[in-house]
């Protein structure tokens, strides 16, 4: 089944960019003429209630500036293969229509919502005098580089370990479609399909579908959500379901890592409504959730040659199953404004940071429905605070959840994580980032460990560490410098960084120990393709500083866009959280 999905995804990725919309060819190099720009008309300093006589959308490809002669082939190739974002897709994110009064706040919010889309580099909305008492709005966007080509290479044979192929703006439709493969060595190869549409249902809705065959399990997820993009929205809603079957491994110091198979099913449907004025409001809603989880009692080893029995005498942890249906109350309080900045999470690209405070709360109580016999209360809280401006900014986000078992009269499955960060940009091309990240788990009902080896939450140079704990604290500092270039192909920069982290044990988390501080220092090569893209490509060269016997010099390649959301849980924290907490609904982009 997964092989058929992968073939279908590949065919879709090849065919869709050449389809037509409303009888017109939408290829970047096709005969369709772009809208006429308003350059030369009298610009308007701002919207002040003038009627909107027309809205013109101008979409630009990734490389708009001419490149040096020896690199001009790059620009031509991209323009031939790239499909600009369609006009009707851009219009779905606008909060204004022809005939309505021009409102400055709605104009700024529309511009910000467009900038928040991962398939765009930047967006601007300008107002021009139409010489008839009204205004003509010009919406100009520039696409990000949409081709996805990510080979996974290794030094020993075979050199090619895996591959991800796709397009992040398929046919200019704001749709990401990709297929991936990874060599399973002694197990099944990993095969997966991922589809994400950011303008689903001809509106500002998001659709996500992911299907993955793992080494000897699977991961299936489906989600349709209308995030709370702007205070002008009245409603936001979510519907999701999915299921996973996967092994969770434990780090046990000198013993080889063992694994337990975890099976989970989840479903969620909910909505919130806005009360209050723009900028200061409350969100009130409800959701119905279902969660089923079970962990095998048999422990085994995942070796390079396949599955082996665990013959060590170490105790095997046990976890209680869960089968629960809950009715949840959703509450949110928000007093937020947005400030446009450059060069914070991106190398030089623009992003909008949230200044102010917001708080989200999920409070649920279980119901006895058929086989769902668990009796509990569930509580999750999400706090964000941001202060500063374009030169200096400090942000804090903390996410905590826990479950109260009404039979045992005790709290369990307590998971907490967060990030505190300070950005300082004293001059163009220079950025200092100082941050701390923390994570913790206690009395877990699913296999759970934290380590400094985690790719997102750990410390560079310690990817092979065998030590684990229940709480983790990591400090990071980075100084970035953008190098001027006239090539117009990419923005380039360098960075120096230092990291330090440690773990603490808890008797409720298996095999956990308390460690001394571990550290790493290094340098990075940074790039953004095309220029001003918010996706940051980097190569990190890290030298570990610690007594961990598994420390090693590390060269890490990565590509990530962190400009949309201030904080995302690391992978080893996500596995411990309830799958039905509406994180997508309360993303607050």
Image (spheres, rainbow, N blue to C red):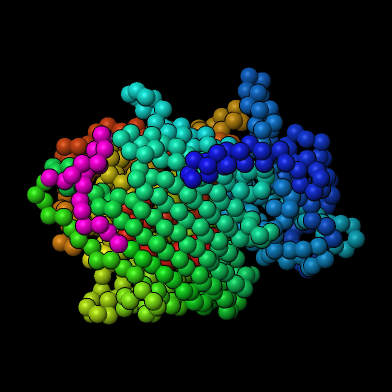
> How many numbered markers are drawn?
0
Q: Magenta stretch containing residue 38, yes or no?
A: no
On screen, residue 121 versus residue 164, left or right, reads: right
What percent of the width, then of the height, locates residue 316?
A: 16, 55
The correct choice, above or below, for 588 with respect to 324 in the image is above
Give me the residue at 52% from left, 53% from top.
209
On screen, residue 352 versus residue 511, left or right, reads: right
Residue 184 can be seen in this image: yes
What percent of the width, then of the height, locates residue 195?
A: 55, 49
Residue 425 can be seen in this image: no
Q: Considering depth in this image, is 315 or 6 the residue closer to the camera?
A: 6
Q: Magenta stretch containing residue 299, yes or no?
A: yes
Magenta-colored span: 294-311
The correct choice, above or below, for 437 with respect to 349 in the image is below
Q: Considering depth in this image, is 332 or 108 the residue closer to the camera?
A: 332
Q: Considering depth in this image, is 315 or 186 the residue closer to the camera?
A: 186
The correct choice, above or below, for 501 with respect to 508 in the image is above
Name which quarter of the figure residue 142 lies in. Answer: top right
Give me the residue at 55% from left, 61% from top.
224
On screen, residue 514 versus residue 179, left or right, reads: left
Q: Considering depth in this image, is 281 or 10 the residue closer to the camera?
A: 10
Name which quarter of the figure residue 574 lies in. Answer: bottom left
What percent of the width, then of the height, locates residue 440?
A: 27, 60
What percent of the width, then of the height, locates residue 461?
A: 27, 37
Give me the residue at 57% from left, 76% from top.
273
Residue that sits furthest to the left in the current view: 313
On screen, residue 382 versus residue 170, left or right, reads: left
Give me the residue at 48% from left, 74% from top.
287
């Amino acid at each position: 089944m997964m092989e058929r999905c992968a073939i279908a995804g590949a065919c879709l990725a090849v065919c869709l960019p050449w389809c037509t919309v409303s009888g017109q060819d939408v290829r970047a190099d096709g005969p369709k003429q772009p809208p006429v720009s308003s350059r030369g008309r009298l610009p308007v300093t701002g919207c002040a209630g003038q009627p909107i006589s027309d809205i013109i959308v101008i979409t630009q490809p990734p490389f708009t500036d001419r490149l040096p002669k020896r690199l001009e082939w790059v620009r031509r190739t991209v323009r031939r293969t790239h499909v600009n974002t369609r006009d009707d897709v851009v219009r779905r994110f606008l909060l204004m229509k022809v005939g309505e009064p021009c409102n400055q706040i709605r104009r700024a919010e529309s511009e910000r919502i467009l900038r928040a889309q991962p398939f765009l580099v930047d967006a601007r909305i300008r107002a021009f005098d139409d010489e008839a008492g009204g205004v003509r709005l010009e919406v100009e966007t520039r696409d990000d580089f949409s081709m996805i080509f990510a080979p996974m290479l290794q030094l020993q044979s075979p050199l090619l370990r895996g591959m991800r192929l796709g397009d992040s703006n398929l046919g200019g439709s704001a749709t990401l479609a990709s297929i991936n493969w990874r060599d399973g060595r002694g197990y099944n190869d990993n095969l997966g399909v991922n589809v994400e549409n950011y303008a689903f249902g001809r509106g500002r809705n998001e659709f996500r579908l992911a299907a993955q065959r793992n080494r000897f399990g699977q991961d299936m997820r489906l989600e349709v959500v209308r995030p709370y993009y702007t205070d002008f929205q009245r409603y936001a809603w979510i519907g999701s379901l999915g299921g996973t079957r996967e092994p969770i491994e434990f780090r046990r110091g000198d013993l080889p890592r063992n694994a337990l198979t975890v099976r989970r099913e989840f479903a969620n449907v909910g909505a919130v409504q806005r009360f209050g004025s723009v900028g200061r409001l409350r969100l009130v809603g409800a959701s119905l959730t279902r969660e089923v989880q079970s962990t095998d009692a048999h422990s085994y080893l995942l070796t390079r040659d396949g599955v082996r029995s665990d013959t060590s005498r170490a105790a095997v942890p046990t976890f209680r199953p869960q089968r629960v249906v809950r009715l949840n109350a959703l509450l949110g309080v928000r007093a937020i404004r947005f400030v446009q900045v450059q060069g914070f999470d991106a190398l030089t690209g623009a992003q909008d940071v949230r200044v102010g405070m917001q708080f989200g709360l999920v409070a649920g109580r279980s119901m006895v429905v058929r086989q769902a016999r668990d009796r509990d209360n569930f509580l999750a809280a999400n706090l964000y605070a941001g202060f500063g401006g374009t030169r200096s900014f400090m942000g804090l986000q903390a996410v905590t959840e826990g479950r109260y078992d009404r039979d045992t009269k005790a709290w369990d499955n307590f998971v907490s994580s967060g990030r505190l960060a300070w950005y300082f940009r004293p001059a163009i091309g220079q950025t200092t980032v100082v941050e701390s990240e923390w994570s913790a788990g206690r009395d877990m009902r699913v296999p759970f460990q934290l380590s400094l080896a985690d790719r997102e939450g750990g410390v560079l140079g310690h990817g092979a560490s065998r030590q684990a704990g229940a709480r983790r604290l990591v400090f990071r500092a980075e100084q970035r410098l953008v190098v001027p270039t006239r090539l117009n192909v990419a923005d380039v920069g360098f960075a120096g960084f230092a990291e330090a982290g440690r773990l603490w044990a808890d008797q409720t988390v298996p095999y956990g120990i308390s460690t001394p501080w571990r550290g790493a220092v290094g340098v990075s090569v940074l790039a953004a393709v095309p220029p001003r893209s918010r996706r940051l490509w980097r190569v990190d060269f890290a030298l570990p500083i610690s007594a961990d016997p598994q420390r090693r010099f590390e060269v890490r390649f990565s590509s990530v866009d962190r400009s949309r959301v201030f904080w995302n849980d690391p992978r080893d924290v996500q596995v411990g959280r309830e799958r039905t907490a509406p994180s997508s609904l309360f993303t607050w982009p």
